Image: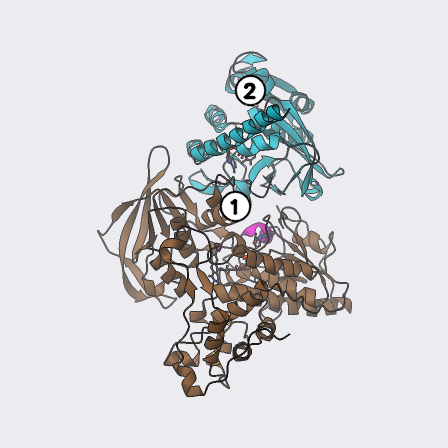
Amino acid sequence: MFTVLSREEIAPKFHRFVVEAPEIARKHRPGQFVMVLPAETGERIPLTIAASDAEAGTITLVVQEVGKTTMAMGLMSAGDAFLSVVGPLGTPTHLERFGTVVCIGGGAGIAPMLPIAGGLRKAGNRVLSILGGRTQELVILRAEMEAVSDEIVYTTDDGSFGRKGLVTHALADLIAEKGKPDLVVAIGPAIMMKAVAEMTRPLAIPTLASLNSIMVDGTGMCGACRISVDGKTKFVCVDGPEFDAHQVDFDLLIKRLRMYLPEEQVARESFLASHECRALKGVANG
Amino acid sequence: MADEVRGVPELPKAERMKVPRHPMATQEPLERIRNFEEVALGYKPEFALEEAQRCLQCANPPCVKGCPVGIDIPAFVQLIREGDFTGSLAKIKETNTLPAICGRVCPQEEQCEVVCVLGKKYKPVAIGRLERFVADWERRLGLSSTPQLAPASGHTVAIVGSGPAGLACAAELARFGHKVTIFEALHKPGGVLVYGIPQFRLPKEIVRFEIDNLSGMGVEMRTDFVIGKTATVHELLNGHGYDAVFLGTGAGLPYFLGIPGENYIGVLSANEFLTRVNLMKAYNFPRTDTPVRTGRRVAVVGSGNVAMDCLRVAKRLGAEEVICVYRRTRNESPARREELEHAEEETIDFRWLSAPVAILGNNDGFVTGLRIQRMELGEPDASGRRRPVPIEGSEYEIPIDTMVIAIGQGPNPLATKSTPGLELNRHGNIVVDEATMMTSIPGVFAGGDIVTGAATVILAMGAGKQAALGIQAWLDRLAKGEVSKPSLVPAQV
Ligand SMILES: Cc1cc2nc3c(=O)[nH]c(=O)nc-3n(C[C@H](O)[C@H](O)[C@H](O)COP(=O)(O)OP(=O)(O)OC[C@H]3O[C@@H](n4cnc5c(N)ncnc54)[C@H](O)[C@@H]3O)c2cc1C
Ligand SMILES: Cc1cc2nc3c(=O)[nH]c(=O)nc-3n(C[C@H](O)[C@H](O)[C@H](O)COP(=O)(O)OP(=O)(O)OC[C@H]3O[C@@H](n4cnc5c(N)ncnc54)[C@H](O)[C@@H]3O)c2cc1C
Ligand code: SF4
Ligand code: SF4
Ligand code: FES
């Protein structure tokens, strides 16, 4: 059992978990993730290790509620435990001194970006971050990202915070102002990563994307996570999750993410229904 | 201990031959395709006694040579006839740690039963069913007997992978008095027995029972632990201080066909399909959270045991038409005969001499069809089987909603690639010394599918046991200071 030491809501529908997992904490390197199975009847889902503390024997996960599993996780409290946490999985980010690196994080993608940006900074890079979200509160982990960035730009769709618009607009301005960076790392919704890749490709700026395909085992055993990179089939869980964004077939990724849309809706609705019942019962009893 | 069943008399040889082989009761095909309960129901005690009566008790029994682990078949069958089921099981367990499992899944028609003397004129003794019978008898009565353990040796051994190879190796080493820890990547131990072979062929309670027995023998089970990620083999030997390591990581890397359209949604590897259903219990969705979708028409490519399992799972998930696409004929199908026959009874549509050439899909990325080419048999190939050759202009298309690829698995490289100094063959399988099962790294042993490529439960189990002997010899030499563990080599991740 992997005990949850704390859970806090850091933004609407964003939860930060600190989980006891000493072996994983000891081995974790930026870019790696864990597969979490909350309970016996649950689903194994991939979540990036947002931070780890080898001494305390803990890892930190930042989870956005999007469906049944993540919503149920949002109801957990300190002292609860996950049935299974496996990792650290995936190939760690290649960290070296590139020069200037632009780290682009969108929505839940900011969480996986945090250790990577930190690692790149430690390796001696100048880290310029661009963080985007629909609204101000959805631009998460600002203080943490500011601590590892030399400069930081925020964007929101509605202009409620930072500049109005998309992360790609901010990237265009940044390149116009400061010239081409040596590396761009993009983590966020597939559509965002695709837009970034399309922008940096004609400029020949090396660009990495961390892909969020659907997974089952996370160890290269099932092939559920497969995508196409440079025309070749790759498994995101072992060959990735980071790939050369210019070679990734994002349209295929976007399609494959829709694989279980109807089932995900069934699961979400039955979950919400059972929780409304509980809430109503609570009222009746109270 | 005497069982409460009376034995039956020994018949004269001539009469034994006249007793017909007892069929095993099964769930009716039309009923069983609606549930995941076990298909083959096993023998009742009276049937087992009568079946045991058939054995000729050959002086030089060929059946024993047919069994990869050399079970003393006439002896255990004789004990059944005498009504001493417990004694019979003990006899089997001298060589086979997992009889309830092997009795169910061994390809008996190629191993012990194919060479049975009775089989020349009549039908062979139902060795597998008898083996299953005594093992089930023990489990139903809750008679689980923890074997005698040697006094603690002070040695520790790490086993990587909890499939039949790892389980058998662990059981032996625990008996020798060593402290054994099994490291398993998944959240449930059992390997293919749990994530691959479906409930209706091998109920998970049986695997659980065997694993509980191991725990009873003091074997520690560390699930959620991936060697190569959570720790490396070299760290097990040094940081963790194990005296030896056994690698039984199996064949867990799915092969794809390499034809166009393989990444369409609805095209799954057998591993994904079976893992979702067996390990994650997707057939209970939405009561369980992991989904699997099959639609109305499912095609499965391949015709081995894995393919049979996929076909029959698809049927049970409610698919109306389930089609098996295989480029050779029924004769070359590598599946256990019983599974093939059960699949046929379950109205699977077998398309022999048919090769998939392209997978078709729509704009949303979903699979919609399969293009198939008809084949004919040509000259024998290296395996001695006649090679299928395409018939020009014979291509046709079938509509499908789901396609499962069951054409084999390779070795998963997570553990091997992270172990510098480990010699592999060109397929990525681990090279071992055949007598000791030791790899190119002193103190590191391997066995099962990771060494042989995808094979059988009994071979993996036998390899695990053999490796336990090799490990025992290594530990003896280690204790005498004749050998030492390799020093820590950093992994190349
Ligand atoms: C390497 C990797 C790292 C990730 N890191 C994080 C993270 O740090 N924080 C975070 O909030 N999210 C992360 N995700 C995404 C997270 O795994 C999904 O949001 C989660 O699985 C959704 O499960 P659900 O049951 O709540 O929602 P569902 O209703 O099942 O799905 C909602 C959406 O999530 C995606 N999804 C569904 N099942 C899976 C699955 N088994 N694996 C991957 N995606 C799936 C699909 O696109 C789906 O449309 C990561 C994904 C990957 C592949
Ligand atoms: C669907 C299916 C049906 C089959 N039907 C039959 C049948 O009817 N009869 C028969 O005789 N054989 C059958 N087989 C073959 C048989 O199951 C295998 O030959 C046998 O299970 C091999 O045993 P093993 O112990 O070598 O490996 P496996 O059973 O594959 O076990 C390996 C274990 O190691 C774990 N592992 C892998 N890598 C790591 C790592 N790095 N760290 C930690 N753990 C790791 C895996 O998760 C797995 O649990 C079937 C196989 C399949 C897939
Ligand atoms: S283990 Fe398999 S091959 Fe050996 S006797 Fe039993 S069923 Fe036959
Ligand atoms: S070969 Fe057949 S008849 Fe002879 S001992 Fe073996 S099982 Fe009995
Ligand atoms: S998740 Fe199964 S192979 Fe990647």
**Label 1 CB sits under 8 Å from any ligand 1 atom:** no
Q: Quadrant of the N terminus of chain A?
A: top right
Residue A95 belongs to the span the image colors magenta: no
Write the residue at 53% across / 54% down: B194
- Residue B440 spot, x, y in % from top left: 62, 62
- Residue B20 spot, x, y in % from top left: 39, 77
Q: Quadrant of the C terminus of chain A?
A: top right
Residue B416, located in which quarter of the rendered image?
A: bottom right
- The residue singled out by tag 1 in the image is B280
Indicate the chain coloured cyan by its letter: A
Write the residue at 60% across / 55% down: B161
Q: Are marks 1 and 2 in contact (CB under 8 Å)?
A: no
Write down the region rendered in magenta: B410-420
Indicate the chain coloured brown by its letter: B
Circle 1 or circle 2, nearest the eye: 1
Residue A23, located in which quarter of the rendered image?
A: top right
Q: Nearer the viewer, residue B25 or A187?
A: B25
Whether B173 is drawn above or below A68: the answer is: below
- The residue singled out by tag 2 in the image is A133
**Label 2 CB sits under 8 Å from any ligand 1 atom:** no
Residue B419 belongs to the span the image colors magenta: yes
Q: Secondary structure at mark 2?
A: strand
Q: Is residue B17 visible?
A: yes
**Badge 2: chain ID:** A
Question: In this rendering, would B245 be left or right of A178?
Answer: right
Question: In this rendering, would B157 be left or right of B308?
Answer: right
In the image, which disc is placed on residue B463? none
- Residue B405 spot, x, y in % from top left: 40, 50
